[in-house]
Image: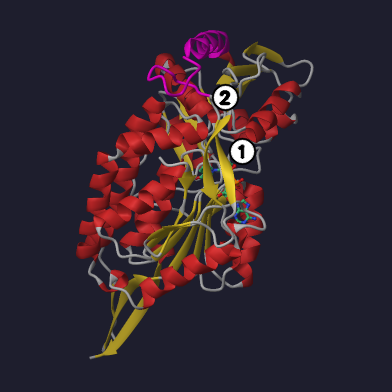
């Protein structure tokens, strides 16, 4: 990696016209490791113009899905060949353990590109037999220029959730990665060119959100779709910006996942997944099971074994392959999470972890028992390695507690009772319910949230709906 991370616009690696740059910081060393081109309205406009030209005049939307798919598969091959470089980029940008980046994020990214390429190629349209002497069918045509605004917690992988289906369906893209995690997006755009995607098909513009490249993209009238993953508050701002242009918007927002462990759960399995659900990626996961509800009959055993397992997690240098929890992604985010820990109300018991004692940006796995249900740490998305544990007695009480949130991204249920598993899954107010597991995805299934967790769904045909303009053709026979 050079000491400048450039934009990639119309097939060229470029700086901003003004020469403006910002620093990118490695959260483990807490020092700047590179400068990044700082884009604004000018760069957003150049990138949208390039994407528009590639869409209106270039071959990309006019190729068949098979030809496009072959190029996207070639990109997936290159992602595999550059897996170490990509994994190191995300680890250095946000402190993700290198083993997670290398064995999960990068392979999943390549898999997303392959899946959406194949899905677009194999998708059928609809046929509507009419008894009036007419024949009606649907076409799914590319929407145009897609602005993709991404968060920092799974930089490359979450970018692929947007870029892969958008490209597979024939759109052109302007991607703005989060300001804390710029590196892997520039590498991705470089690899896309190497794979043979025409210039202008995948552009990357770096910068911040408000009054910067992010806002400029979401307000741009030349954009046909805005796809955003990030905080619920930012989602509201982006929805307003897109709404002003009547641009369809997809919002994947925050969460406050409930995890229900019933007396009849397979306890080893429940502990294993519950640990992963809240401490993976140092808890910087929208899907984190950060509210843990445990039925009283199993409470003491579960909590004591859960705390022991949390204390065994290897915390430290994210570049060490043994590390399971690195630092938080940035100083700003570290200060926010530390504030939550310092604000834990009296009466709650911190069973392990708590406010950090040194000056690193590491927060140890933290388990809090008996926090009042109306306290900030229970109600707000902490986005750190912090879980609150609450006892319950009845199934109805557990469901009511789980649903007592403005969010609705996901929930987990641990039970060996088949009827209860179905009943509770149906009653939970969430876009995804995992039963006896966590984070398992079928890329054809809908993914998204209700309430403050977002608008729209990703995955298979759900991504097709968003990234295409479905058209009805009606013919007289
Ligand atoms: P964020 O909202 O601060 O930033 C996300 C992106 O939006 C960044 O690229 C940022 O530069 C940009 N942005 C900020 N303000 C903007 C504006 N006014 N206009 C345009 N762009 C703007 O979120 P974050 O801190 O990067 O990510 C963490 C959040 O993302 C958490 O709330 C988490 O739950 C959520 N998240 C949700 C999902 C999901 O699938 N639902 C997945 C991952 C993360």
Q: Is residue 316 magenta?
A: yes
User: Where's residue 179, x and y in %?
Assistant: 56, 46
Q: On the image, numbered disc 1 is attached to which residue?
A: 403
Instruction: Point out which mark residue 453 bears.
Output: none
| Left/right of residue 85 with respect to residue 348 in the rendered view | left
* Mark 1 and mark 2: Cα distance apart in space: 22 Å
Which stretch did the figure color magenta? 298-326
Does label 1 point to a residue whose CB lies under 8 Å from ligand 1? no
User: What's the residue at 51%, 73% (across, down)?
Assistant: 222
* Residue 16 visible to the viewer: yes
Task: Tell me the mark number nearer the camera, choosing from 1 and 2.
Answer: 2
**Residue farthest to the right, as pictured:** 346
Q: Secondary structure at mark 2?
A: loop
Which residue has dot 2 on it? Answer: 385
Q: Nearer the viewer, residue 216 or 139?
A: 216
Residue 275 % position (x, y):
48, 21
For residue 339, above or below residue 117: above
Residue 343 shown left or right of residue 44 in the figure:
right
Magenta span contains residue 337: no
């Amino acid at each position: 990696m050079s000491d400048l991370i450039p934009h990639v616009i119309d097939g060229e690696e470029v700086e901003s016209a003004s020469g403006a740059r910002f620093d990118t910081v490695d959260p483990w060393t807490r020092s700047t490791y590179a400068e990044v081109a700082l884009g604004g309205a000018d760069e957003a406009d150049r990138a949208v113009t390039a994407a528009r030209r590639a869409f209106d005049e270039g071959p990309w939307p006019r190729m068949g899905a098979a030809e496009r798919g072959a190029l996207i598969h070639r990109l997936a091959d290159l992602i595999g060949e550059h897996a170490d470089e990509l994994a190191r980029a995300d680890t250095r940008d946000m402190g993700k353990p290198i083993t997670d980046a290398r064995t999960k994020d990068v392979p999943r990214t390549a898999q997303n590109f392959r899946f959406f390429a194949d899905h677009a190629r194999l998708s059928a349209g609809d046929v509507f037999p009419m008894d009036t002497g007419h024949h009606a069918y649907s076409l799914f045509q590319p929407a145009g220029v897609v602005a993709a605004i991404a968060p920092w917690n799974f930089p490359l992988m979450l970018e692929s959730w947007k870029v892969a289906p958008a490209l597979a369906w024939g759109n052109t893209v302007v991607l703005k990665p989060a300001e804390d995690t710029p590196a892997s997006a520039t590498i991705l755009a470089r690899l896309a060119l190497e794979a043979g995607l025409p210039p202008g098909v995948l552009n990357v513009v770096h910068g911040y959100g408000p009054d910067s490249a992010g806002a400029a993209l979401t307000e741009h009238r030349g954009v046909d779709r805005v796809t955003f993953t990030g905080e619920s508050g930012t989602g509201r701002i982006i929805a307003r910006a897109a709404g002003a242009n009547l641009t369809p918007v997809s919002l994947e927002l925050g969460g406050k996942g409930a995890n229900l462990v019933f007396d009849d759960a397979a306890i080893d399995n429940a502990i294993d997944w519950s640990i992963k659900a809240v401490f993976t990626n140092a808890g910087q996961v929208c899907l984190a099971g950060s509210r843990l509800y445990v039925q009283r009959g199993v409470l003491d055993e579960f909590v004591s074994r859960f705390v022991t397992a949390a204390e065994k997690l290897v915390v430290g240098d994210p570049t060490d392959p043994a590390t399971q929890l690195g630092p938080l992604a940035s100083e700003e985010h570290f200060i926010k999470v530390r504030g939550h820990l310092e604000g834990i109300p009296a009466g709650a018991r911190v069973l392990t972890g708590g406010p950090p004692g040194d000056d690193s940006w590491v927060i140890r796995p933290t388990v809090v028992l008996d926090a009042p249900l109306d306290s900030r740490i229970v109600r707000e998305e902490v986005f750190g390695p912090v879980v609150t544990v609450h006892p319950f007695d009845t199934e109805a009480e557990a469901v009511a507690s789980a649903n007592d949130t403005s969010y609705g991204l996901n929930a987990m249920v641990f039970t060996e009772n088949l009827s209860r598993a179905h009943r509770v899954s149906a009653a939970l107010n969430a876009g995804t319910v995992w039963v006896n597991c966590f984070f398992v995805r079928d890329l054809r299934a809908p993914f998204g949230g209700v309430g403050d967790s977002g608008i729209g769904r990703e995955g298979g045909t759900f991504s097709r709906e968003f990234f295409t303009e479905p058209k009805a053709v009606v013919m007289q026979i």
